[in-house]
Image: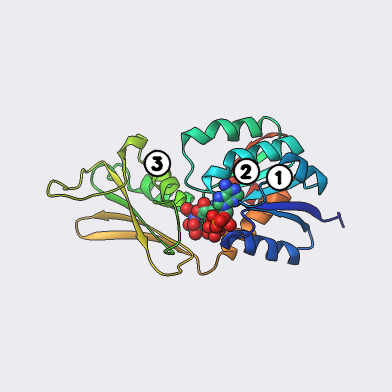
Amino acid sequence: MAPPIPIAVNGAAGRMGQRLLTLAEEDPALRPVAGFDIESPVTAAALREVNARALIDFSHADALEASAKAAAGAGAALILGTTGLDASHDGAIDAAAARVPVVAASNFSVVVNVLHHLAAEAVRLLQPDAAPGWDVEVMEMHHRYKKDAPSGTALALARTLAAAAGRDRSCIRLERHGDEATRDPGEITVQTLRVGDHPGEHTILLGAPGERLELKHVSTSRDSYATGALRAAAWAAGRPPGRYAIAEALGIG
Ligand SMILES: NC(=O)C1=CN([C@@H]2O[C@H](COP(=O)(O)OP(=O)(O)OC[C@H]3O[C@@H](n4cnc5c(N)ncnc54)[C@H](OP(=O)(O)O)[C@@H]3O)[C@@H](O)[C@H]2O)C=CC1
Ligand SMILES: O=C(O)C1=N[C@H](C(=O)O)C[C@H](O)C1
């Protein structure tokens, strides 16, 4: 059997970081060798010191640049789960991907990644009715402590739906309010709920007069995300540099 792959985690003190470290301890294919956080920032030198072959980042968008530089500098694969990223982060991710393997995804659950395929297929099957005959909405629910909104997954699902319907991303709306808020037939709106300690839920609604299809994923524990991220780390470590799709890393499709 191959020796366990040394991995490090950024955001180690957080909800995801804790689960990642615990599950990695139990995984014979992996060996957690370091945890970094806001108080102990990740650097290439620190990763080299423990010979980490993958850095898993579930922290905050503000940490992205440091994580990308550290992984690239140490020759470690970068597994990026942090959400709340925008176009301003693309440069740092691309720069890392030029030097090391990178798997970045708003959701590492295998089932959520299957949901993307199902959602796209549902929209395609409803064509040519999908635009404008069917209303398309995405609803997400998470714990009260979540910092970013809407969730990265909800945004990614909205983009998948828009692409499948042949629409531009500009059709995605993040709110609806006021007295002139009638639905535009071409829009895809993302609705955000924050309730208690929920680890995460996403519902896609496809509705027409008289009927509605709902595709829903519910996480009952963060292990759904953590096991996918650990699997991606084991898959990516040692591969050539480049940006790899989550579906490829998880072996979906
Ligand atoms: N892709 C996926 O499958 C999933 C992604 N996520 C995403 O992962 C991220 C973390 O989620 P969660 O664990 O719930 O959040 P937490 O707030 O529990 O954990 C984040 C950790 O990162 C730390 N942190 C904040 N800023 C920095 C920084 N600049 N450098 C290093 N560490 C920092 C936080 O410290 P402090 O508390 O002191 O701020 C905290 O310890 C979020 O973006 C979330 O959306 C979550 C689940 C699944
Ligand atoms: O913060 C969370 O908890 C989660 N964040 C990710 C997101 O923003 O999509 C993934 C999952 O939904 C849990």
Task: Residue under label 2, please give it.
Answer: 103
Q: Secondary structure at mark 3?
A: helix
User: Distance from label 2 to label 3 (Cα)?
Assistant: 23 Å
In the image, taking residue 170 as reference, residue 177 lies left or right, namely: left
User: Which of these two is toward me, 56 or 236?
Assistant: 56
Q: Is residue 212 above or below residue 89?
A: below
Pointers 2 and 3 in contact (C-beta within 8 Å)? no
Q: Earlier in the sequence, mark 3 or mark 1?
A: 3
Q: Amino acid at mark 3?
A: Ala
User: Label 1 crowding class (10 Å Cα cut-off): few <14, some 14-19, many 20+?
Assistant: many
Residue 211, image x, y percentages = 25, 60
Label 3 C-beta lies within 8 Å of the nearest ligand 2 atom: no
Label 2 C-beta lies within 8 Å of the nearest ligand 1 atom: no
Q: Earlier in the sequence, mark 2 or mark 1?
A: 2
Residue 224, image x, y percentages = 57, 63
Task: Residue under label 1, please give it.
Answer: 236
Q: Is residue 171 above or below residue 141?
A: above
The quarter in which the N terminus is drawn is bottom right
Pointers 2 and 1 in contact (C-beta within 8 Å)? yes
Residue 108 visible, this angle? no
Count the labels in the image: 3
Residue visible at 79% across and 52% down in the picture: 6
Task: Residue under label 3, please give it.
Answer: 164
Residue 198, image x, y percentages = 45, 67
Residue 236 visible, this angle? yes
Q: Amino acid at mark 1?
A: Ala
User: Label 3 crowding class (10 Å Cα cut-off): few <14, some 14-19, many 20+?
Assistant: some
In the image, taking residue 12 as reference, residue 172 lies left or right, namely: left
Residue 86, image x, y percentages = 46, 38
Name the residue at the front extreme.
39
Residue visible at 46% across and 62% down in the picture: 200
